[in-house]
Image (cartoon, grey):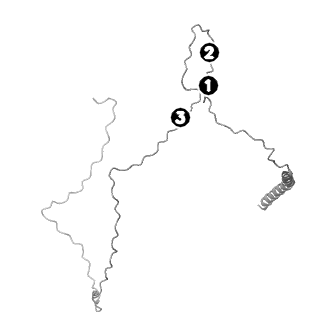
């Protein structure tokens, strides 16, 4: 167990040494880059060339939307039909029409009623001079309760007008079901 832990610790140490070496090797290159960046030529205002501003011109803006009829000559020669059709013109929808919202005024304006303040509730006085109920003293000279014997089981006579209860008669055992026949019932 300890050998596995020692091997893992050696691997970690070796990885740390390699990564620290990479940092030390690349550090001078970072420093050289910062020095070259600081000492490099600066941008001058006269070296900047002006650029043209872009304008948005939709394709086909100058083409009219009204169709033109070109007459077809009667004695035209047959030319092969090209499978590529010309590019359709660009659709420029008209600008949206802005309709300002109208203010709705109801035909009958109702007056707004402001709630009135209600008086604060009054305090109800606590009743005084209430007499406490009198307590009856517990008698101290009481004799212990006497034990009364439990009643014994006695037969209760049955009324004469009620018939005696029915006796339990055993049910007959089920018989075997009739054998299954192959003939269908009519």
Query: Taking 12 as reference, is 143 above or below it?
Result: below
Query: Taking 85 as reference, is 55 above or below it?
Result: below
Question: Which residue is nearer to you in this view: 125 or 48?
Answer: 48
Quarter placement of the N terminus: bottom right
CA separation in Å, label 3 and label 1: 22 Å
Q: Position of residue 14 (x, y in %)?
A: 83, 56
Q: Which mark is residue 94?
A: 3
* Mark toward the start of the polypeptide (3 vs 1): 1
The single residue placed furthest to the left in the displayed view is 161
Read off the residue under disc 1. Answer: 87
Q: Residues within 10 Å of mark 3 (few under 14, many from 20)?
A: few
Q: Position of residue 119 (x, y in %)?
A: 33, 73
Circle 1 SS class: loop
Q: Quadrant of residue 148?
A: bottom left
Does the residue at mark 2 contact the one at mark 3 (Cβ under 8 Å)?
no
Q: Position of residue 72 (x, y in %)?
A: 57, 12
Circle 3 SS class: loop
Tell me what residue is drawn at x 42 percent, y 46 percent: 102
Dot in front, 1 or 2: 1
Read off the residue under disc 2. Answer: 81
Q: Position of residue 30 (x, y in %)?
A: 84, 53
* Mark toward the start of the polypeptide (1 vs 2): 2
* Mark toward the start of the polypeptide (2 vs 3): 2
CA separation in Å, label 1 and label 2: 16 Å
157 left or right, relative to 42: left
């Amino acid at each position: 167990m300890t050998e596995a832990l020692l091997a893992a610790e050696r691997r970690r140490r070796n990885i740390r040494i390699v990564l620290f070496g990479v940092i030390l090797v690349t550090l001078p290159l970072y420093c050289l880059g910062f020095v070259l960046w600081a000492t490099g030529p600066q941008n001058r205002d006269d070296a900047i060339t002006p650029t043209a501003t872009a304008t948005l011109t939709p394709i086909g803006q100058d083409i009219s939307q009204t169709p033109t009829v070109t007459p077809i000559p009667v004695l035209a020669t047959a030319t092969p039909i090209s499978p590529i059709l010309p590019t359709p013109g660009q659709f420029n929808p008209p600008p949206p029409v802005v309709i300002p919202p109208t203010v709705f005024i109801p035909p009958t304006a109702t007056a707004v009623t402001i709630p009135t303040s209600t008086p604060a509730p009054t305090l109800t006085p606590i009743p005084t001079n209430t007499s406490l109920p009198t307590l009856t003293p517990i008698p101290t000279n009481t004799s212990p309760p006497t034990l009364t014997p439990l009643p014994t089981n006695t037969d209760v006579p049955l009324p004469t007008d009620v018939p005696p209860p029915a006796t339990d008669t055993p049910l007959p055992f089920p018989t075997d079901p009739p054998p299954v026949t192959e003939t269908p019932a009519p």
